[in-house]
Image (cartoon, rainbow, N blue to C red):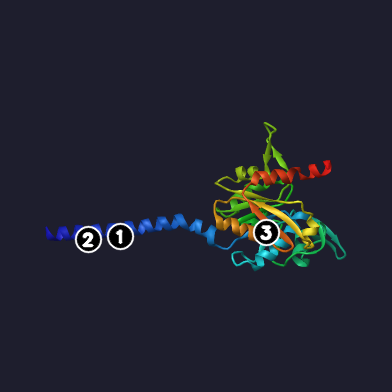
Amino acid sequence: KKRRKGGGWMSAVRLRRGLEVLVGIIIIIAIVPAMSSASGREKICIIGSGNWGSAIATVVGRNAGRLDFCQDEVNMWVFDEKIDTEEGEIMLSELINTRHENAKYLPGIKIPKNVIAYPELKRACEGATLLIFVLPHQFLPKLLPTLREHADSNCRGVSLIKGLDFDSTTRKPILVSKSIEQSMGDGFRCGALMGANVANEVAEQHMCESTLACDFEDRELNDRTLAIFNEPPNFRVSRINDVAGAEVCGAIKNIVALGA
């Protein structure tokens, strides 16, 4: 009987210790993804490489190279095409990676060497924690499924796309950022960067201002996102929470300017 009591006591101790270990593992599994998003190094992917995309890449590339919380390399997805040069035809992605210049859409401007062009979207966005959308919104439906599958599970986004989308059924206007959020799913949050900017002036480091509208429900993430875009004294960016207001103003500003 004593042996049975002792054996039962030891079994209970082992069971308790086993449960403690199991609970510890569950807690780690639960908090690690949040920790990697809040305190890990940002992996940035720019979706688009046109005039505005290449211009913002100069700002983001320089900032990522100096910010401790960012990975040095910034990926940029390129819709690849053949470019005529003095040496013959060369693919746009290769041209950007070897000459560090987008000779077709932003000629004469050097793109930071840490900005790497990828023609394959999967490779460009693999594990990305911040997606920067800067391309015609018509491209989004075909790209978003790949982004959803390969970006980091805690990824967020910032849209630099000016304009509004429209519901195919009701024809009512939809914010591009909301359209992205709905397509990405899983609590994906998307902000917007809007301003009366000319891409070439930003790339040439003239004095420019812009507004980052985002609310990622985490002060550190909001501050990090601002730091990635803000490059005073040349490109000054201020942050607000009103994504809808900033995005609508970005869409109608040219209409107002034409009317004036």
Q: CA distance from mark 1 to mark 2?
A: 11 Å
Three-letter code for the amino acid on which mark 1 is drawn: Arg
Q: Which residue is mark 1?
A: 17
Three-letter code for the amino acid on which mark 3 is drawn: Phe
Residue placed furthest toward the right: 86
Q: Residue at x 76, y 54 (%)?
A: 52
Badge 2: residue crowd in 10 Å (few <14, some 14–19, many ≥20): few
Three-letter code for the amino acid on which mark 2 is drawn: Met
Helix, strand or loop at mark 1: helix
Counting residues from the N terminus, which is met first, the one under dot 3 or under dot 2?
2
Q: CA distance from mark 3 to mark 2?
A: 59 Å
Q: CA distance from mark 1 to mark 3?
A: 49 Å
Position of residue 136 in the picture relative to residue 11 (left or right): right
Q: Which residue is mark 2?
A: 10
In the rendering, which numbered label is found on residue 229? Answer: 3
Single out the mark in the foreground, 3 or 2.
Answer: 3
